[in-house]
Image (cartoon, rainbow, N blue to C red):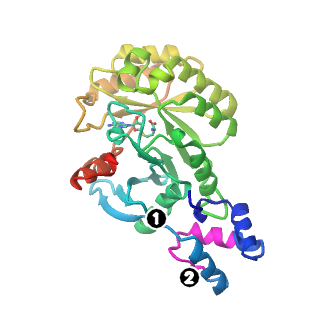
Amino acid sequence: MSANLKSMTIPELGAILKELGQPAFRAKQVFTWLHKGVRSYEEMSNLPQSLRAALAGKYPINAPKVVRKQESQKDGTIKYLWQLSDGNCVETVLMRYHYGNTVCISSEVGCLMGCAFCASTLGGLVRRLEPFEMLDQVLFTQIDSGLPVSHIVLMGIGEPLDNFDNVMRFLELVNSPEGMNISMRHISLSTCGLVPKIDALAKRKLQLTLSVSLHAPNDEVRSTIMPVNKAYPTEELLAACRRYYAETSRRISFEYAMIDGVNDSVEHAKELIRRLKGLPAHFNLIPLNHVEESPLKPSSKNAVARFQKTLEDAGIPATVRRSLGGDIDASCGQLRRKYTKEQGSSADDK
Ligand code: SAH
C-alpha cells in the first residue's frame, strides 16, 4: 500500500516529518488537520509553506466523491454512495436518533461471507478498505450533511473482522482525542462470527459493543443461511461470545434478522434461551429487508412480536429494530448493488 498519512498514528506521522527535518509537534498539527477532513495541504495554515509543498508532492490527500445521496422523507436518514480513489464504491448511512447522529460505515468493498439474505455479498469481495477509507466515511458524512456524528456502527458493507488490522487501526484513529475523539462506548462492531477474530478482539479489551449476527438458534438453520457457520458452528460461536464477555465484561448484542418460516418460531426462541443461559445478552430483532435476488421474506409482525415476548419473558431483553430509511434502499449493500447494475459493467465483476 502506498503510504497514506490519514491512516497513520501521531508517532508514525512524527517519523515521516522528522525525515523532512520537522520538529515533533508538527505531527499533532498534521494529524488534527487531516482528521478535520481538509482536502489540501494549503488549508493547514499553521504549517510552513515549504512543508505544505513537500507533503503535497509526496502524499496526496484523498477524499471520496459523492456519487449518490438519498435522503429519507420519513425519518431524515441519509444514505451516501461514495466513490473511492480507485473507482470502487461503498455506502455509508447517517441515522438520526434522539441520542445523537450515528453513521453506519462499510469496512470492505463487497463481502466474502455469502449470507443468503444480504445484498452486500452478491458480487463477492472486491477488496478490503484502508483505515483512512473508513475514517473518510465518518468525516465526509459529517462535513457533507453538516450534522455532527457522535456514534459509529460498523454494520455497512463487508465483514469488519475479515479486515481486522485495518479496522483496529481505524478504531484507534477515530477514538483519538486529537482527531474525531469518538468514544469506544459509542461504537458498535458487527460480525457474522469469525471465532478466532472475536478472541483477538476480546484481548484488546475495547469498550465498544460487539454485535454478533446470530440469525438462528442452531447449526441446522444457521448453516442454510450463513456459510460461515460451517467454519465456526453455533456452539463454537457462543463459546467465543462467553469468552468475550469474560474478558471484557461487555454484554453481547445479538442481531437476529427475522425470516418468515426459517428462524422465527417460538421453538426457535426457546432454543436460543436454552443455549444462551448465563450469558448477558441483548437481542436486536430486525424484520428481514427483502433483497430482490433472494426468495427469503420478512416475518410477519405477529411472529416478530411472539418471538420478542418469548425472549423477554425469559429475561433476555429484545428490541425490534425500527427500520430507518426503508424508502431509500438503506439496507446493507442495496444502493451499491443498484448503482453497479445500472453502470452495466461493475465493481462487482472485477
Ligand atoms: N458482516 C457483518 C456486518 C455487516 S451487516 C455482520 O455480518 O454482522 C449488518 C447486519 O445486517 C448483519 O447483522 C447482517 O446479517 C444484517 N443484514 C444483512 N442483510 C440483511 C437484510 N436483507 N435484512 C436484515 N438484515 C440484514
Residue 233: image x %, image y %?
Answer: 49, 19
Q: Nearer the viewer, residue 249 or 91?
A: 91
Say whether mark 2 is within 8 Å of ligand 1. Answer: no
Q: Which residue is found at the position 33% from the left and 30% from the top?
A: 116
- The local crowd at label 1, few if under 14, some if 14 to 19, many if 20 or more residues have their Cα within 10 Å, is many
Q: Is residue 126 above or below residue 135?
A: above
Report the side of 14 relative to 239 (left or right).
right
The amino acid beneath tag 2 is: Glu
- Quadrant housing residue 299: top left
Measured as percent of width and height from the top left, residue 174 is found at 59, 56
Horizontal and vertical percent for residue 327?
A: 25, 50
Ligand 1 visible in quadrant: top left
- Mark 2 or 1 closer to N-term? 2
Q: Are marks 2 and 1 in contact (CB under 8 Å)?
A: no
Name the residue at 53% across, 71% down: 60
Disc 1 target residue: 140
| Segment colored magenta | 28-44
Quadrant for the N terminus, please: bottom right
